[in-house]
Amino acid sequence: MDRLTRVGVTCGVLASLICLFAGIWILYFVGFEATKDNAVSTGIGLYFIGKACFVGPMLVITALRTVKHRD
């Protein structure tokens, strides 16, 4: 694994963890309350958790695929 691939994988893992922790942090302080003001904040928290499942792994997959195409 070369340097560029290692940076790509590291950034993918960090992006996934940051999005996951941001979503959990938002939901921790807002909760799943059904009030009008908290509905948007709950949606944003769930969005960040969902984003963590897609953004990080896609960065890792892209970084690992570039190695195959360079060889």
Image: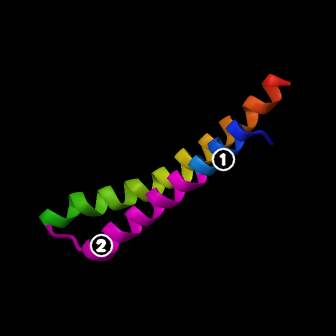
Q: How many marks?
A: 2
At 79% from the left edge and 24% from the top edge, which residue is drawn?
Answer: 69
Q: Mark 1 points at which residue?
A: 9
At 66% from the left edge and 35% from the top edge, which residue is drawn?
Answer: 62
Q: Quadrant of the C terminus?
A: top right
Name the mark nearer the viewer: 1 or 2. 1
Q: Position of residue 21 (x, y in %)?
A: 44, 66
Quarter of the image holding residue 27? bottom left
Q: Quadrant of the N terminus?
A: top right
Distance between mark 1 and mark 2 Cα atoms: 33 Å
Q: In this view, does 49 lie to the left or right of 60?
A: left
Q: Position of residue 59 (x, y in %)?
A: 60, 41
SS for callout 1: helix
Q: Is residue 47 left or right of residue 13?
A: left
SS for callout 2: loop
Of residues 36 and 9, the one nearer the viewer is 9
User: What's the residue type where badge 1 is placed?
Assistant: Val
User: What's the residue type where badge 2 is placed?
Assistant: Phe
Q: Mark 2 points at which residue?
A: 32
Of residues 59 and 27, the one nearer the viewer is 59
Q: Where is residue 44 in the image (x, y as percent from the top left)?
A: 31, 56
Dominant SS in magenta: helix
Q: Is residue 32 magenta?
A: yes
Q: Where is residue 43 in the image (x, y as percent from the top left)?
A: 30, 57
Q: What stretch is highlighted in magenta?
A: 13-35
Of residues 56 and 2, the one nearer the viewer is 2
